Image (cartoon, rainbow, N blue to C red):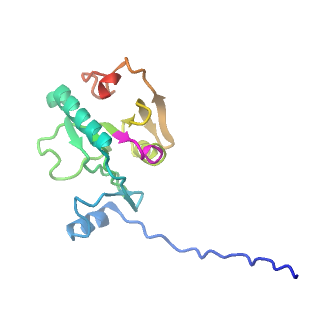
Amino acid sequence: MPVVEAEPTFEEARPIFRLGVDAYHQMIRAGIFDEDDRVELIEGELRAMTPINPGHAGKNKRLNRLLTLRVGDAALVSVQDPLTLAPRSEPEPDLMLLRPRDDFYEGANPTPADTLLVIEICDTSLPYDREVKVPLYAAYGVPEVWLVDLKHRRLDLYRDPGPDGYRQVLRPDPSEVLAPLLLPSLHLRVDEIW
């Protein structure tokens, strides 16, 4: 039987069209996406967001209430709202603590300069949040990110952002009391999250 060699395959290089934040906002205004569509813009690509299960939703509510009661007028608690990382990204973190503004960000979405803390709650999204979103936040200068890992019941803190990621990564013990670097008046014991 003759031996047939496989022909080398050729993958045609096709350009990928990447969206900018402005084009994404135009699509939203045109009704292509609405608030029920679970998508976010990451580095010019529209990414489907994982569905929120009851454990994730409950943890988001718990942290929202806890943070709202603790921060008072020192910060605005933002829940699953867009964070504009110009020019090609607009993730929707689970929670953010923002610098207070009189207009409550009605005129424009917050940017990294407005953030005091970003919190991502993850269950099935842990690898994506850790490998895609956390480095993205660092590259755009988000000062601090807390990654709440539901599966392993632990918290990872990311501080001191740079172009290659966060230079300080901490995993505090459950009994430790934390305070965001830019909001030192907020004290939260890690085990209060659970």
Seen in the image, is 72 located left or right of residue 22? Answer: left
Is 128 covered by the magenta stretch? yes
Q: Quadrant of residue 55?
A: top left
Q: Is residue 88 visible in this depiction of the protein?
A: no
Query: Which residue is at 36% across, 36% downward?
Result: 143
Q: Residue 187 versus residue 102: which sits nearer the camera?
A: 187
Q: Residue furthest left?
A: 102
Span of residues in magenta? 120-129
Horizontal and vertical percent position of residue 43:
42, 57
Q: Quadrant of residue 8?
A: bottom right
Query: Which residue is at 21% across, 71% downward?
Result: 30
Q: Is residue 117 above or below residue 183?
A: below
Which quadrant of the figure contains the N terminus?
Answer: bottom right
Q: Residue 7 versus residue 162: which sits nearer the camera?
A: 7
Seen in the image, is 102 located left or right of residue 71? Answer: left
Horizontal and vertical percent position of residue 62:
24, 33
Horizontal and vertical percent position of residue 154:
42, 30
Is 171 covered by the magenta stretch? no
